Image: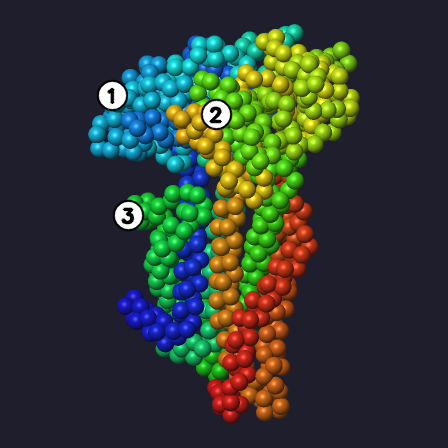
Amino acid sequence: MFKNYFKVAWRNLIRHKAYSAINIAGLALGLACSMLMLLYVQHELGYDRFNSHAAQIYRVNVSFDGTAESQEPWTSPPVAPALAEALPEAQAVARFRTLSQVLLKTGDKQIYETGAAYSDPALFDLFTFPVVAGSKTAALSSPTSMVLTESLAKKYFGNESAVGQVLTLDLDGFKQFTVAAVIADVPQNSSVAFTMLLPLGSKNKNTLENRWDFDYTTFIRLSANAEATATARKLKTFAAQFYPRDAENDRDIGLYLQPLLDLHLSGIGQEAGLSNATYVYMFSLLAVVILVIACINFTNLSTARSAKRGKEVGIRKVSGASAGELAAQFLGESMLLSFIAMLLAVILAELFLPLFNQLSGKVLRLSLTDPATLLQWLGIGLVVSLLAGSYPALFLSRFKPVEVLKGKFAQSRNGGGLRKSLVVAQFAISIALIIGTLVAQSQLVYIRTRALGFDREQLVAVPMRGEQRVKAALTYKQLISTSPDIVQASAASALPGDDELWRTGVMAVRNNEKVDQIAATFQVDYEYFKTLGAGFAAGRDFNRLFATDSTVFILNEAAVKGYGWKSPQEALGQTIVWQARVKGKEGKVIGVVKDFNFLSLHQAVEPAVFHISRAAISDVVIRIKANRAAEALAFLRAKHAELDPSRPFEYAFVDDNLARYYQSDENLSRVFGIFAGLAIFIACLGLFGLAAFTAEQRTKEIGVRKVLGASAASITLLLAKDFLMLVAIANVIAWPLAYLAMQKWLESFAYRTEIAVWIFVAAAAAAVAIAFATVSYQAVKAATVNPVKSLRYE
């Protein structure tokens, strides 16, 4: 019996090549797209799960107002050892701090590496990082030891053993470190990412004892039987004792536990690979949506062809076939088509995976040799074939043999309502995807072009390295001032686009009350705001003509609001204390600079305090003349070599530094746009098949109309108008759904564009044009057939 079913299914597939090809192509494309998107979703949801004790590991977050809603992923260095003593259930506690980049010397090579980080030896008791050479116990135990990943070790030492080798690193001066261990490369889906680890024991003792330096990440592993809620209560008591509220601290600083498995999609912090959970939900939904569109195609085309198989069903029923046997036969045909589509989908997914990786910024692999993965995709293929094939199978098996043998069914419109509903659903989804793509592109254009509060163009950042970087920055600024291609230059501790901002407590007195807030601190020179091109809301800029300007402060508007002053003018003349908790610098506010975005537009401008100081200056920012970039960079390179021939020249354009915040958005927007286009293409495949079927069903009618004088254009419009009406209904459904979905996505940006009316008009026009073009081909083809042939059609 099954052999006979297969033979019939194969013959039908060969006999109706065009419809079979459309069905297989649509389903294969849908499956391939869903495969790629689900690979991405699995990768994102699988973050940190490679760790053996992942469920027991937590990150310790801080809140500067004592509320869980305002957590930040930082702690100060002495928190970790104090927690290890205070919590009996803490099996391991480790600190982790990344470096933006470090200059590495080996032999005559000098290379900047970007994956360096500081940590404690206990890091290996928390995370599962297999050691491939050397000793895990010796790793980071000495102030001069270091750990390399396997790929970095191979980069510098080839096949030679890296353990025992010495590398020289520029960490406020050149220091030598001995490789104590080599570990396997850190998985891409790890929240703790690095290529080399340096011991925290090599840092200054005072730095590690500063409880107000919130610049470190602390991880803790609890025992298997520990209750996180009980530990959280202990942590609250610990925080109150560790950060007591007193005359120098008027805040309730809180410490909180966040599960490791929640870090990646939580939105708290900026760990390696931090992701927007919205994209995971969107890709999951898109994967399902594309599969649904492909299944709708399959169902529509199968039921549309049902009239052609009516007599076959009637004869089989008269011959004794039951409805169940017929349903099994037609379902088997669907499963055969689905199996072929699945094989084709795997080939397509493998072919397009490199492009998908490039666009998404991931390194994903389609491993069909893994039994679990193989079963997963076979299961999806089976479910799809059942979903897509069940209705057509039941629909065909319920034909009444007397009616179909008399030909009554061929003239009826059974299933027409369902087919129309499915076409509307397809196009509603497709139009919503077009709108989503246009909104995403509009937001990205807005980000790239929005005024940031300073002139980001033609700004070059040149970092200084080594123990004498402050002196080097000031000297370099003087050296480059002789070039006519240099408009302005400034030396500072941080620039826009710099993730390593120093945040500290800054206190003000308002109405005889002390008000403390954590603010980003910028140590600058007198030319900082002139170089950036930032404007002032009140007061004035720093000026060398005022001898006291080395003791005063400038705030941004966000800091003014944080202190509760009603206007920038009210802040002028007020006294603030920088690093109040350690009795730091005190001075008056002389100016309020307009808010400028020095970090991502995903977040609002945070409070910032600027003051004249040379203590932490490490960067020189230079405004160069427009259209003279090549000449200016050559000059800057020459002067850097003159200043410090021992270190290579490095630079970056500030607008490029800022643009990297949106690289993930741009990549995923492109991926989303491509898949949205493919979804529309799949919908059009189904529409093409339905249009061909409709034209075929109305062949005689078309012949009669032509004999009576109807033009090809009027016949084309006649056949197209029904489909265009369905597209119009799809627009009405898609618009509000797309608006709500994209409004939710835009909420992830602190600064966002409005969803313009033209986007909906453009999506509607595109859908109508695509549908009309798809249907018109079949309509014109039917309209140009000789009417004599049409009238003979049966």
User: Can you say which quadrant of the picture contains the N terminus?
Assistant: bottom left
Q: CA distance from mark 1 to mark 2?
A: 30 Å
Residue at (47, 18) in percent of width and height: 468
Query: What SS does tag 2 mark?
Result: loop
Question: Are circles 3 and 2 on residues that touch, CB within 8 Å?
Answer: no
Marks 3/2: CA–CA distance: 50 Å
Residue denoted by label 3: 369
Q: Which residue is mark 2?
A: 464
Is 167 placed left or right of 317 in the picture?
left
Q: Which residue is mark 1?
A: 164
At 70% from the left and 17% from the top, the residue drawn is 546
- Tell me the CA gap for discs 1 and 3: 39 Å
x and y percent of residue 451 in the render? 65, 40
Q: Secondary structure at mark 3?
A: loop
Above or below residue 85? Residue 657 is: below
Quarter of the rendering containing residue 704: bottom right
Contact between marks 1 and 2 (CB within 8 A): the answer is no
Of the image marks 1 and 3, the number of the one nearer the N terminus: 1
Question: Where is residue 750 drawn, in percent x and y?
Answer: 63, 37
Tags 1 and 3 in contact by the CB under 8 Å rule? Answer: no
For numbered disc 1, what is the local secondary structure? loop
Amino acid type, residue under disc 1 in the picture:
Gly
| Image x and y of residue 484, in percent | 58, 35
